[in-house]
Amino acid sequence: MDRGRAGGAADVDIVVVADGDDFTDLMKGPLRRLFGPRTTRVESAAELRARLDGNARVVVADARARCMDSVEAQALVREIAPEVSFVLIDADRDELRRRIALCEQVVSLGALVAQVTHEINNPLQSAAFNLDFALDVLRGGGDWTAARHVEVVSALEDARTALAQASAIAGDLRTLARCNDGARETLDVRTILDSALLAAAHQTQQRARVIREYRSVPWVSASPGRLRQVFVNLLVNAAQAITKGAAEENAIRVSTSTDARGCAVIAVRDTGCGMTSDVAGKIFHPFFTTKPPGTGTGLGLAICHDIVTALGGAIEVRSEPSRGTEVRIVLPPSSLGTGSEREP
């Protein structure tokens, strides 16, 4: 039988034998990376037989499924499509989640290492090229003219810039690896916001009006330096999303409030260029950036995400192209006290 044409069923890469969607949803991520994106679930021998007449590449069976015996499923695969891989998974859900999470961490670490190598190698190659040029000129002898002096100085300055970029990437990675470090204090986020606004003023004042909308909030437990770093990063990103020269026509709104659960909510909203949902879904990934080459490492928002989650909080983004962006941070209240009644 021509398995590529028979059966009339939609082609799939992965067939999952399981009682419900819980097991299937749990396995989708790792299975997609290994075998492809098209997954379907079956609960009977008839359904499995129909899928095996298609283009299935692998059958994954939950050994604890009640809908179909795993031995029967394996026998069907061997009978109808022996070239299809059969994988039997026998683990309780908690253990399976733990194993998958560990695999995800290893995959992410591998991708991060590859990206770090690429990002650091580029400026190092540039620095090496410019240093080699300067050395060649200096070793070449001959008359030392003003033009040669300018060339060597320019090459050395370019090398220094490239090395500074590599150093900045290394520094950001160090911060990313230590986002839960730093002594925590019970603090008012509005005080930290004011400090961050002052630090980012050189960026914001050229592009937009800054509007504070502070409402009462519970105090939170956090490292002041880490939290200030998060706010400065969000403010600079908001400013850079707005074109220079029309500050009166644009705004960056910084607000605080308390949600229904009693958590502190901090929002930074801009009237900048905005972004698509596809881009917004990637902005917290390490090294993802929409900025021109050489103007950002792509680690700023990844660091923000890790700092906030290390505090037990959450960070989310809402954006539309040409309509601006809002980044919202939610932080749990400190157990040591609250300043929710103190007005700014």
Image (cartoon, rainbow, N blue to C red):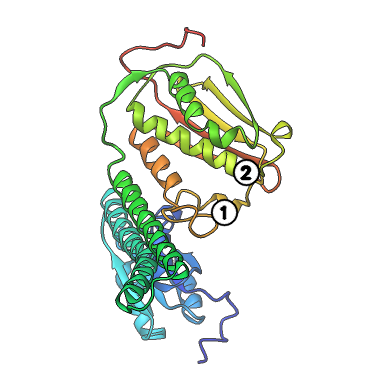
Give the left or right position of residue 171, taking residue 6 as reference. Answer: left
Q: Earlier in the sequence, mark 1 or mark 2?
A: 1
Q: Quadrant of residue 5?
A: bottom right
Question: How far apart in space, not on screen, are marks 1 and 2 (Cα)?
Answer: 9 Å
Residue 224 at x, y = what percent? 35, 26
How many numbered discs, if any? 2
Q: Residues within 10 Å of mark 2 (few under 14, many from 20)?
A: many
Give the left or right position of residue 256, taking residue 62 as reference. Answer: right
Q: Which amino acid does the dot numbered 1 rest on?
A: Val
Residue at the image position 48 percent from the left and 67 percent from the top: 39
Q: Quadrant of residue 14?
A: bottom left
**In the rendered image, is residue 211 in sight?**
yes
Q: Secondary structure at mark 2?
A: strand
Q: Is residue 59 above or below residue 171?
A: below
Residue 323 at x, y = what percent? 70, 42
Q: Which amino acid does the dot numbered 2 rest on?
A: Ser
Q: Is residue 14 above or below residue 172?
A: below
Q: Are marks 1 and 2 in contact (CB under 8 Å)?
A: yes
Residue at the limit of the structure toward the front, as seen here: 143
Q: For mark 1, what is the residue?
A: 279
Q: Residues within 10 Å of mark 1 (few under 14, many from 20)?
A: some
Residue 238 at x, y = what percent? 57, 39
- Residue nearest the observer in this picture, 205 or 274: 205
- Residue nearest the observer in this picture, 52 or 113: 113
Residue at the image position 50 percent from the left and 50 percent from the top: 283
- Residue nearest the observer in this picture, 54 or 132: 132
Residue 50 at x, y = what percent? 51, 77
Residue at the image position 62 percent from the left and 49 percent from the top: 275
Q: Secondary structure at mark 1?
A: helix
Q: For mark 2, what is the residue?
A: 319
Residue at the limit of the structure toward the right, as seen here: 249
